Image (spheres, rainbow, N blue to C red):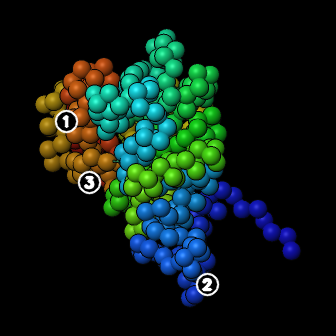
């Protein structure tokens, strides 16, 4: 019998379906047990203890490894736990890390704290400044941390160029792929060694789990990361893994609506007099539009706006704003608005915020999957108020 070869996405969303041999459940049951019996003292089964391995977590790992095209995935408690895992497993004490200067505020804080403790040496560098990047790589880092598109200004880093340059000095390159998800960008195919996600965002997509994952290209690197995640005790819970896999199954459908809504909203608000800037890689006037079009297969649904009226205008924009909740996080089905300077990026020093371009008038929008016309109407009203 001839059988069609199924695509990556179909395989990923079918992970674990109809594998229950006891009842024939279509959806794989959740395994909450912390421990597993041994058949005999010298005969463990596949699983012994849920910190080291759990069947529900492994289904999520399988699906994410398939989507990113990696040798294996390691799901951990949060996105920051994923960075902690990489820092502990891959960077010997005292060695150097290069981090994109406008990385997520929590990433900036973690690496700043590790540097302050003298655990690591950290250079925060503008990856779009080739001279600065070359200088940092000359100092022989062990790990290079890329986040693209960046948060909150949607700057794009050339993954292939940076991972090639990292490889030449013997550094591993990790790409935080949280904003795109594996459906819009596949960093391992562009040369990265490890992909990281805050699965809290698009992958789970329903704002009811915090989680993270690292996916390694190379099997031995994956084996190391899995061992370290167990040793450090960072692994994700069965319940979170169950919910995240459930969310992942609708990722493609969600992203299509996110995309449709974002395009329509951008078209509707571009050129509004209350705006001094509109940041989104899908806009033709985004300085790296061509690079984004080349390395991503979609532009995503996170955008940021800069109000010319600064902090006062931010107050007027938010006062009475409908639908968009003022909250941190992004990538859920619901629309959110955030003021990076006082919220997500408050952990960044004022000097670092200024350098990264995070001003008092900047707002980040995570465009949800509500009705398109409603989203346009409420943002247009808010911009009129902000004038
Ligand atoms: C949210 C986020 C993180 C941190 O993830 P948590 O799950 O909140 O720990 C890291 N990187 C990016 C780009 C994020 O948006």
Cα separation between marks 3 and 1: 21 Å
Q: Position of residue 367 (x, y in %)?
A: 37, 48
Cα separation between marks 3 and 2: 44 Å
Q: Which residue shows up at 58% across the image and 64% down it? A: 13
**Label 2 Cα crowd, 10 Å radius (few <14 / some 14-19 / many 20+):** few
**Rendered position, 158 above or below 81:** above
Point out the quarter of the image occupied by ligand 1: top left
- Residue 21: assigned label: 2
Seen from the viewer's position, the closer of residues 106 and 34 is: 34
Seen from the viewer's position, the closer of residues 337 and 66 is: 66
- Which of disc 1 and disc 3 is earlier in sequence? 3
Q: Position of residue 196 (x, y in %)?
A: 48, 44
Q: Which residue shows up at 14% across the image and 37% down it? A: 315
- How many numbered marks appear? 3
Q: Nearer the viewer, mark 2 or mark 1?
A: 2
- Residue 323: assigned label: 3
Q: Secondary structure at mark 2?
A: loop
**Rendered position, 97 above or below 20:** above
Residue 168 located left or right of residue 267: right
Q: Which residue is mark 1?
A: 342
Q: Which residue shows up at 50% across the image and 79% down it? A: 37
Q: Position of residue 145 (x, y in %)?
A: 46, 32
Q: Are marks 3 and 2 in contact (CB under 8 Å)?
A: no
Q: Which residue shows up at 46% across the image and 33% down it? A: 92
Question: Is ligand 1 closer than 8 angstroms to the Cβ of mark 1?
Answer: no
């Amino acid at each position: 019998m001839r059988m069609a070869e199924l695509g990556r996405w179909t395989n990923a969303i079918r992970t674990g379906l109809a594998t229950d041999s006891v009842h024939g459940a279509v959806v794989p049951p959740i395994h909450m047990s912390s421990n597993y019996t041994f058949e005999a003292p010298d005969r463990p089964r596949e699983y012994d203890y849920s910190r080291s391995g759990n069947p529900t977590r492994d289904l999520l790992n399988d699906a994410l490894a398939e989507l990113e095209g990696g040798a294996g995935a390691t799901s951990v408690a949060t996105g920051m736990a994923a960075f902690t895992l990489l820092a502990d497993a891959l960077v010997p004490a005292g060695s150097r890390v290069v981090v994109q200067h406008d990385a997520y505020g929590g990433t900036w804080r973690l690496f700043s704290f590790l540097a302050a403790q003298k655990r690591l040496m950290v250079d925060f560098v503008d990856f779009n400044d080739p001279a600065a990047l070359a200088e940092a790589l000359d100092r022989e880092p062990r790990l290079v941390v890329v986040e693209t598109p960046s948060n909150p200004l949607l700057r794009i880093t050339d993954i292939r160029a940076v991972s090639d340059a990292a490889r030449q000095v013997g550094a591993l390159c990790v790409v935080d792929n949280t904003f795109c998800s594996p459906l819009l960008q596949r960093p391992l195919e562009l040369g990265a060694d490890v992909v990281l996600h805050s699965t809290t965002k698009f992958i789970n997509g329903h704002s009811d789990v915090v989680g993270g994952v690292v996916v390694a290209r190379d099997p031995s690197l994956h084996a190391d990361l899995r061992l370290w995640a167990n040793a450090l005790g960072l692994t994700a819970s069965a319940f979170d893994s169950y919910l995240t896999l459930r969310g992942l199954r609708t990722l493609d459908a969600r992203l299509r609506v996110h995309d449709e809504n974002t395009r329509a909203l951008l078209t509707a608000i571009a050129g509004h007099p209350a705006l001094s800037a509109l940041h989104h890689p899908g806009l033709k006037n985004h300085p790296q539009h061509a690079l984004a079009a080349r390395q991503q297969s979609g532009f995503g649904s996170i955008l940021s706006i800069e109000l010319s009226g600064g902090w006062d205008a931010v107050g007027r924009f938010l006062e009475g704003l409908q639908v968009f909740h003022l909250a941190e996080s992004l990538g859920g089905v619901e629309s959110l608005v955030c003021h990076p300077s006082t919220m997500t990026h408050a952990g960044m020093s004022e000097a670092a915020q200024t350098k990264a371009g995070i001003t008092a008038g900047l707002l980040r929008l995570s465009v949800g999957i509500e009705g398109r016309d409603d989203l346009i109407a409420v943002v247009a009203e808010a911009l009129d108020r902000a004038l």
